[in-house]
Image: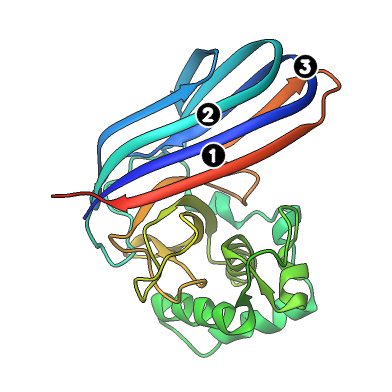
Amino acid sequence: MRLTVDHVTRYTYDQPVRGVVQSHRLTPSSFEGQTVLDWRIDVSDGLAGGQFRCGAGDRIQSWSVQGPVTEITVRVRGTVETTDTAGVLKGHRETVKPALYLRDTPATQMDGALETLSAAAEGSANPLEAAHRLAAAVADAIAYRPGTTAAHTTAAEALALGEGVCQDHAHVLIAIARHREIPARYVAGYLFADAEGRAHEAAHAWAELWVPGLGWVGFDPANRCCPDARYIRLGSGFDAQDAAPIKGIARGPGQEKLDVTVAVLAAQQ
């Protein structure tokens, strides 16, 4: 499947700031199942800084904008060729050991309800089956409802609410997988459409769990599936904050307002 991405992030400030420094995880890697054909990032009045590939295999690029400035636009455009690998991440270059992803973060800390939910994996001697059971339990426990949770909602809070967005599904799955000693991490990316082919939030997130013999396998409880050719993988981290495509800081007292639009389309072959 050939997918095109147009991702625009616009920052506005109610008074000029002296400057902005950002770190971008906005360039997808090429691996089996995903090939980047072209990709471009533009930052209005921005100066590109150093870049490197982190231990998890993600490309990190720094940008700076000199002020005074009241608006910054980050635009990502590109084309990616994808194929379905049944959610298995194959040929992705990284050096971080899977056991590192057993570490909890504030967003994925356990409580009693999460421990109860993690019992869905009990009775399964097959690690892949256990991972599927956990993903299904999350999908059953949390209804997909955009706008019901916030960026800093934790896994425990989302489960208590019983509804949320893909970020919440991913955080809950990561929390209960780690509780079962299954390394798990958060993945940020794009989605062309949901399982029925209907329109969906194009900026998307899911989780990857480490399965012995297979490696990292993606699970998307929000859509009750494993990532397939409709998905573009950007990067990963311990949780949503760690895997954020854009991180940054503005120097000055101005209040920041954020507006994001993402379009993912199927291109002509």
Residue 113 lies in quadrant: bottom right
- Image coordinates of residue 48 in percent, x first then y, are 49, 14
The vertical placement of 55 against 99, above or below, is: above
For this orientation, the residue located farthest to the left is 269
**Which circle, 1 or 3, is nearer the viewer?**
3
Residue that numbered label 2 is attached to: 74
Q: Is residue 17 left or right of residue 183?
A: right
Other-residue count near label 3 (Cα within 10 Å), few / some / many at <14 / 14–19 / ≥20 = some
Q: Quadrant of residue 219?
A: bottom left
**Label drawn at residue 210:** none
Mark 3 / mark 2, whichever is N-terminal = 3
The residue that mark 1 highlights is 245
How many other residues sit within 10 Å of disc 1, few (<14), some (14-19) or many (≥20)? some
Look at 73% across and 63% down and name the residue there: 149
How packed mark 2 is, by other alpha carbons closer than 10 Å (few <14, some 14-19, many 20 or more), is some
Q: Could you tell me the amino acid type at mark 2?
A: Val
Q: Secondary structure at mark 1?
A: loop
Pick the quarter of the image with the N terminus. Answer: bottom left
Three-letter code, disc 3: Pro
